[in-house]
Amino acid sequence: MNYIIGIDQSTQGTKACLVDEGGRIVKRCDRAHRQIINDLGWVSHDPEEIYQNTLAIVRELMETAGVSEEEIKGVGISNQRETTVAFRKDGTPAADAIVWQCSRAKDIVARMSEEIPGFAETVEEKTGIPFSPFFPAAKIRWLLENCGEEPNKLLFGTIDTYLLYRLTEGRSFKTDYSNASRTELMNIHTCTWDPELLQAFGVTEAALPEICQSDACFGGTTFGGLFTKPVPVLSMMGDSHAALYAQGCHKRGMVKTTYGTGSSIMMNIGPEFQRSSCGLATSVAYAADGQINYGLEGNINYTGAVITWLKDQLMLISSPAEVEPAARAANPEDTTVLVPAFTGLSAPHWSNDAKATITGMTRTTGKNELCKAALESIAYQITDVLNAMEKDSGIPITELRVDGGPTRNAYLMQFQADLADAAVSVPDMEEFSALGVAFMAGKNAGIMDASVFTNCERKQYVPAMTPEKRVEKQALWKDAIRRTLSVHTEI
């Protein structure tokens, strides 16, 4: 049997999946890493810890799966995209990585917007993405100003680039189109690093990786000496892009949502660039077989992380599994709405200063009602993005293909279908980010074909909410969003 190792380096941890020729995961190993959060709410990761975890789980995978290294025909790497690493040429990190959720660069965004007339518009026109501290360009500028290293001695990249650099022992300094398109440094029209943007953010092209197709051969790795001969890395994509690819969303208008710590909602809009007018980003969905597919995307900072907040901060639940029965036990007429703007609001509202709010509570609101509001906030945020996608693309969304841990929550999936008025399709497979790069690497290695995209069963949740109830629920959400956006301006 031939296999591909699909590595998904995500926000909470790193997974290694052994994927067979039929596209099925036959073994998975994973390891969590620390979430480093300071008193200012800055979110960081230790890149060295992530690298060492990657070596450890691949070693564990090979030792427990009982396969030989000769059976491994390639590696694919997906990653948590906008998380940004500054590292030295010997591969050692110059600072902790700034996680995509972290808004510490918001003052840089405000300063540059004020100092350079029309800069925010320039960024969006050149990159397809609203100017925001969410993306790596401002994070890189923050690192240049604060990490205490000489700029000409630093390299910068997203996690895919850093892992590849370490895994190839510094021989390969590359990224793919999907990740590069999320940096706010790549010109979305030419798919090259943009000189004007590089100058504005103070970074040189030499400090950035080479941009390649998602199905390129990125180099070879022995995983720190585990293999006697290097195994080729045959695919790299951002995690959301890899999930889109694995979900079979290869035609224009197809949509997937990844429910993770945050959420990415992405629509394949085909080979022609289209700029959003509704607060979404346009990036490269993936580039393969010599063709670029663009994607309309909305990103949400807090979806699955809201459940973690219920558990770790409020201590209302002791495990994520408890939130569904709590929501079902809640008063269905309770009007409590949570807007989880813990680090501002992202798509489609884009407010860096917004703070989380809870509205509509009554004297009878209790633990169950707060759990229900937290769970429903996930679907509300995603529906906002879906509505924006329909306006931008002109394509009605009738099906939403989903993946991620929270999709096991039947209450959430039904509420999502009801609120979005679209079928929600939940596959019987998991780990679509790892599968996406594994499928592409397997195709590149010549051991997989198109059948891998159709070998899963799907459970369908269809809309059951009345139009009147849907309007009522959406009105509560819109009012809560209005109040959230007005809080910081009133103080």
Image (spheres, rainbow, N blue to C red):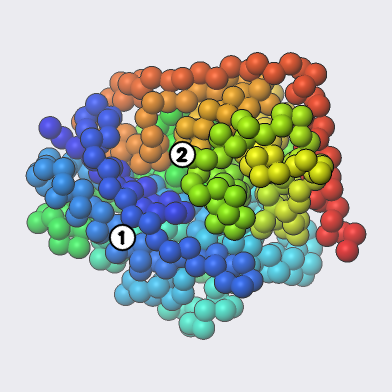
161 w.r.t. 142: above or below: above
- Label 2: element kind: helix
Q: How many marks?
A: 2
Residue 257 in the image: x percent, y percent? 54, 34
Q: The residue under label 1 is which amino acid type?
A: Asn
Depth order, front residue of 407/25: 407
Q: Of the residues tagged 1 and 2, which is closer to the observer?
A: 2
- Label 1: element kind: helix
Give the crowd class for mark 1: few <14, some 14-19, many >=20 residues within 10 Å: many
Residue 23 in the image: x percent, y percent? 28, 29
Residue 425 in the image: x percent, y percent? 50, 23
Which quarter of the rendering shows the N terminus? top left
Q: The residue under label 2 is which amino acid type?
A: Gly
| C-alpha span from label 1 to label 2 | 21 Å
* Image disc number at residue 53: 1
118 w.r.t. 283: above or below: below
Q: Is residue 151 visible?
A: yes
Which quarter of the rendering shows the C terminus? bottom right
Q: Residue at x 23, y 40 (%)?
A: 27
| 327 relative to 26 in the view: left or right | right
Q: Is residue 392 visible?
A: no
Give the crowd class for mark 2: few <14, some 14-19, many >=20 residues within 10 Å: some
Q: Residue at x 25, y 66 (%)?
A: 169
Q: Which residue is mark 2?
A: 405
Q: Residue at x 37, y 30 (%)?
A: 429
Depth order, front residue of 137/388: 388
Q: Residue at x 35, y 66 (%)?
A: 49
Q: Quadrant of residue 253?
A: top right
Residue that sits furthest to the front in the current view: 364
